[in-house]
Image (cartoon, grey):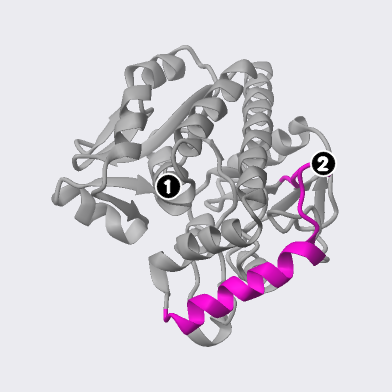
């Protein structure tokens, strides 16, 4: 693919059969303010490296899908004012028009799969927005999870969403949701949502075994790992839910929807919570990075044992 560029260090890691973990780039351009965006991007990559895997941040740079951004490219992406938010539908346009773009969960999954990267770490996936049963405002992340065999490590879905309907849609798409050391679907900022999960895993090797079974069966769906934020860092659901409802009401009153909705809601919640939500977002990204790297290493070890 002429439009897909895989960084030399990622190519070398693949040649050396080292585990690689993909990272999205919307958190850099749309998810966090400066300087937390760049600092967190670098910290997450370093955590993955410490666990024995190779990080590969993905973005669209001048119409090329780049897998494995350098630190200079991450800084440049964060500084630019012309960066589009790219999902599946936007990829052909971004490539043809020579755009700069940060990749959502859906777009990152596509690029990771094309680059033969099996594991992807994010904060939280998109899903069915509140009121989505009437507006049909449903993230492309969910359909992508149903058709692209990448394992996604997250803190569940963003708490601004309708989590119950999001789980229903994931079931429809055939996506297994694995609760890591939990029997409940986490609510992003909070450890518990009250929504029970069918599958619980307690160590990274459990996840790796399920991934291997999925691949042996040649199933095309993703696997979603739901990793709750730590007890020390969480905002209990009873505390954050009223703030989320306020932010959702503001968005409705200001007629904000589509790609603009999630950044608006996250920014409003950050202000309402006096910055606490941003701290939680950073901590859960780090936690997911550790788990994602450990899972990629566990899967790598299983493959070596099978050779």
Q: Position of residue 280 (x, y in %)?
A: 67, 46
Magenta residues? Answer: 227-255
Observer-nearest residue: 127 or 191?
191
Q: Where is residue 236 in the image (x, y as percent from the top left)?
A: 80, 57
Q: Earlier in the sequence, mark 2 or mark 1?
A: 1
Q: Is residue 44 visible?
A: yes
Q: How crowded is mark 1: few (under 14 residues within 10 Å), some or many (20 or more)?
A: many
Observer-nearest residue: 213 or 260?
260
Q: With respect to residue 135, does 196 lie above or below? A: above
Circle 2 is placed at which residue position?
A: 232
Q: Is residue 224 magenta?
A: no
Q: Residue at x 79, y 52 (%)?
A: 191
Circle 1 is placed at which residue position?
A: 26
The C terminus sits in image quarter: top right
Q: Is residue 10 left or right of residue 40?
A: left
Q: Which residue is drawn at 35% across and 46% down?
A: 102
Observer-nearest residue: 58 or 236?
236
Q: Is residue 298 left or right of residue 80?
A: right
Q: Is residue 241 magenta?
A: yes
Q: How far apart are marks 2 and 1 (CA)?
A: 26 Å
Q: Can residue 136 be seen in this view?
A: no
Name the mark on residue 203: none
Q: Residue at x 39, y 33 (%)?
A: 115
Q: Is residue 139 left or right of residue 188?
A: left
Q: In this view, does 101 lie to the left or right of 218?
A: left
């Amino acid at each position: 693919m002429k439009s897909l560029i895989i960084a030399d260090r990622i190519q070398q890691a693949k040649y050396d059969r080292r585990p690689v973990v993909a990272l999205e780039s919307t958190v850099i351009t749309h998810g966090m303010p400066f300087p937390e965006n760049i600092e967190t991007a670098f910290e997450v990559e370093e955590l993955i490296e410490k666990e024995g895997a190779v990080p590969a941040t993905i973005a669209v740079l001048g119409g090329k899908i780049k897998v494995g951004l350098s630190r200079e490219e991450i800084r440049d992406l964060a500084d630019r004012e012309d960066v589009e938010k790219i999902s599946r539908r936007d990829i052909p346009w971004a490539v043809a028009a020579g755009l700069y773009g940060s990749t959502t969960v859906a777009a990152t999954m596509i690029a990771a799969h094309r680059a033969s990267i099996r594991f992807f770490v994010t904060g939280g996936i998109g899903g069915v927005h509140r009121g989505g049963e009437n507006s049909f405002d449903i993230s492309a992340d969910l359909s992508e999870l149903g058709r692209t065999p990448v394992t996604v490590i997250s803190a569940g879905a963003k708490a601004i969403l309708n989590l119950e309907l999001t789980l229903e849609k994931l079931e429809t798409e055939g996506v297994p949701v694995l609760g890591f050391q939990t029997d409940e679907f986490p609510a992003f900022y909070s450890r518990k949502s009250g929504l029970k999960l069918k599958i619980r895993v307690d160590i990274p090797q459990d996840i790796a075994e399920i991934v291997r079974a999925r691949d042996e069966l040649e199933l095309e769906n993703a696997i979603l790992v739901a990793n709750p934020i730590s007890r020390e860092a969480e905002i209990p659901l009873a505390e954050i839910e009223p703030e989320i409802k306020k932010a959702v009401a503001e968005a409705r009153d200001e007629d904000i929807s589509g790609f603009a909705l999630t950044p608006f809601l996250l920014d409003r919640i950050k202000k309402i919570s006096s910055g606490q939500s941003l701290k939680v977002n950073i901590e859960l990204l780090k936690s997911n990075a550790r788990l994602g790297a450990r899972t990629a290493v566990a899967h790598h070890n299983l493959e070596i044992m099978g050779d």
